[in-house]
Image (cartoon, rainbow, N blue to C red):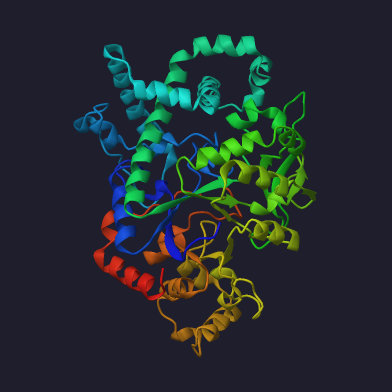
């Protein structure tokens, strides 16, 4: 699919300001959409929306690839539906409003979500809710297993599913039926949360689309081991048939981010079994994502051509091997079912000609990162003069430092290269590096340009969303107030978008 020349902002909903310690789908989200429209942007890129576990990575600590994260539910929106009362909603006191403190956010929001569920149940006693029934029926293919999984996870105090009673871990039908009866109330609560989440999200998405804003969703190539996907579809993963633990785990070999590679720990797919089903699970996953987004970015796209497989006993990603994947067969099947594929490919890391051929065969835009452009010579694929039209340029992604943070740690060689490339005689002449970089991205040949909100707000290293070199403390950044999204800032961005036909 070929995209029209346009630009957008990268921001995860958890990064919105709110009174409850984490961004949600309420007032600030709508104010952000308004900011995008008046700034001339046409795209909003998000990260995966699923419910997160330990360390709260939406990529590798995600309980479900189909479900939504209940922590993003707006309590104020629940009050509008008379499931809560505004006077009873007490803001969460936080020491640092620029960071999500999940340790306090989770119990705070859970308290109100359970109150809302109690009122929902009371409403059901008075009259049925056809919308809730229809939602549960429409999404039963994933919702039933998800709700049971989350109820079981809570009953086992978060213990990974492979340590549950063997009958539950191996999904014995009688054991599952018995537990479903015992946990009936908890299961219905989980379905209620998903009903509310997607109701609020669909309302927000419709508002965005009416404002001319398209949403770029995100599919992480892998899923978390302790997730409903692996528990309910264990045959689709390379697991030990007795212990159900991963025989191999995912990662990448040593690269820009780490000398020992990145060991993500996610289980590897059983591609032979997926081929036997004509990739039914993967296709359902894409369809589900396109119900809440207009386009889909595939994280770690290269694994559809070949993936790095590491034995499950390894402590780092060095001792792995590349294994071929049936990328062409999969995308052909996906195209047959979906038609034009609204897909963008995250093609960073160790990219071979075979990966490029797979990407280009389906006309998927690849990614260019300006922060990567100035450490080499004039042949760097990340330098704007080497771009093709069908690509997506970022100043940096959620995995990079902010542009100001990058500049503070860039080498003297990188700074000098950057200065000369932009027509300066010395790096000392450069001020407002983030705005120089934003202009460079917007003016480039790339059909799509995405800017992290941190760069627009002149933020430094403390506003970094994720550092792939370590797992702890990531995914927590928030901006502190919608008042930062000023008309003056919009005017500046609108002028740039108009100047470069975005």
Left or right of residue 130, residue 486 in this image: left
Q: Residue at x 44, y 86 (%)?
A: 429
Q: Quadrant of residue 195?
A: top left
* Quadrant in which the N terminus appears: bottom right
Q: Residue at x 54, y 20 (%)?
A: 152
Closest to the observer, 267 or 45: 45
* Quadrant in which the C terminus appears: bottom left
Residue 384 seen in the current view: yes
Q: Position of residue 469 (x, y in %)?
A: 61, 55
Q: Position of residue 24 (x, y in %)?
A: 36, 42
**Residue farthest bottom in this picture:** 425
Left or right of residue 438, residue 208 in this image: left
Q: Position of residue 77 (x, y in %)?
A: 28, 36
Tell me how many marks there are.
0
Q: Residue at x 72, y 55 (%)?
A: 260
Above-or-below relation of 324 to 87: below
Left or right of residue 442, residue 25 in this image: left
Q: Position of residue 194 (x, y in %)?
A: 43, 30
Above-or-below relation of 139 to 375: above
Residue 259 seen in the current view: no
Q: Quadrant of residue 246?
A: top right
**Residue farthest left in this picture:** 87
Q: Residue at x 45, y 49 (%)?
A: 476
Above-or-below relation of 348 to 84: below
């Amino acid at each position: 699919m070929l995209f029209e020349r346009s630009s957008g902002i990268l921001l995860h909903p958890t990064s919105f300001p709110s009174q409850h310690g984490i961004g949600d789908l309420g007032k600030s989200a709508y104010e952000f959409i308004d900011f995008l429209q008046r700034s001339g942007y046409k795209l909003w890129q998000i990260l995966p929306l699923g419910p997160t576990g330990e360390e709260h990575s939406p990529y590798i600590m995600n309980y479900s690839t189909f479900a939504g994260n209940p922590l993003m539910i707006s309590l104020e929106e629940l009050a509008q539906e008379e499931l809560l009362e505004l006077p009873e909603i007490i803001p969460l006191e936080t020491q640092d409003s620029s960071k999500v403190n999940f340790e306090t956010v989770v119990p705070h929001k859970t308290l109100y979500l359970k109150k809302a569920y109690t009122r929902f149940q009371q409403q059901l006693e008075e009259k049925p809710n056809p919308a809730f029934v229809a939602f549960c029926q429409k999404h039963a293919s994933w919702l039933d297993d998800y709700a049971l999984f989350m109820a079981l996870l809570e009953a086992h105090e978060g213990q990974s599913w492979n340590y549950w009673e063997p009958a539950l871990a191996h999904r014995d039908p009688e054991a599952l039926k018995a537990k479903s009866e015992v946990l009936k109330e908890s299961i219905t609560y989980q379905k209620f949360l998903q009903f509310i989440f997607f109701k609020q999200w669909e309302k927000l998405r419709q508002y965005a689309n009416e404002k001319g804003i398209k949403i770029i969703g995100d599919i992480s190539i892998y899923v978390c081991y302790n997730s409903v996907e692996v528990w309910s579809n264990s045959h689709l993963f390379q697991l030990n048939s007795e212990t159900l633990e991963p025989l191999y785990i995912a990662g990448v070999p040593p690269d820009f981010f780490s000398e020992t590679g990145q060991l993500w720990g996610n289980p590897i797919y059983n591609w032979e079994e997926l081929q036997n089903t004509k990739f039914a699970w993967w296709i359902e996953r894409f369809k589900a994502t396109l119900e809440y987004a207009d386009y889909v970015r595939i994280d770690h796209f290269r694994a559809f051509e070949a993936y790095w497989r590491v034995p499950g006993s390894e402590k780092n990603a060095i001792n792995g091997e590349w294994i071929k994947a049936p990328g062409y067969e999969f995308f052909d099947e996906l195209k047959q079912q979906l038609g034009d594929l609204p897909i963008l490919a995250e093609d960073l890391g160790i990219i071979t000609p075979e990966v490029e051929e797979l990407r280009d065969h389906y006309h998927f835009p690849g990614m260019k990162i300006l922060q990567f452009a100035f450490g080499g010579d004039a042949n760097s694929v990340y330098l704007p003069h080497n771009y093709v039209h069908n690509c997506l340029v970022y100043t940096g992604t959620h995995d990079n430092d902010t542009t100001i943070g990058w500049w503070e740690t860039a080498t003297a060689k990188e700074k000098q290269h950057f200065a000369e490339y932009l027509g300066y005689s010395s790096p000392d002449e450069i001020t407002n590096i983030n705005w120089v970089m934003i202009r460079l991205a917007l003016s480039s040949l790339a059909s799509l340009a995405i800017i992290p909100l941190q760069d627009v707000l002149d933020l430094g290293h403390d506003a970094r969303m994720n550092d792939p070199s370590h797992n702890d403390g990531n995914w927590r950044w928030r901006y502190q107030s919608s008042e930062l999204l000023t008309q003056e800032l919009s005017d500046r961005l609108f002028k740039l978008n108009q100047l470069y036909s975005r």
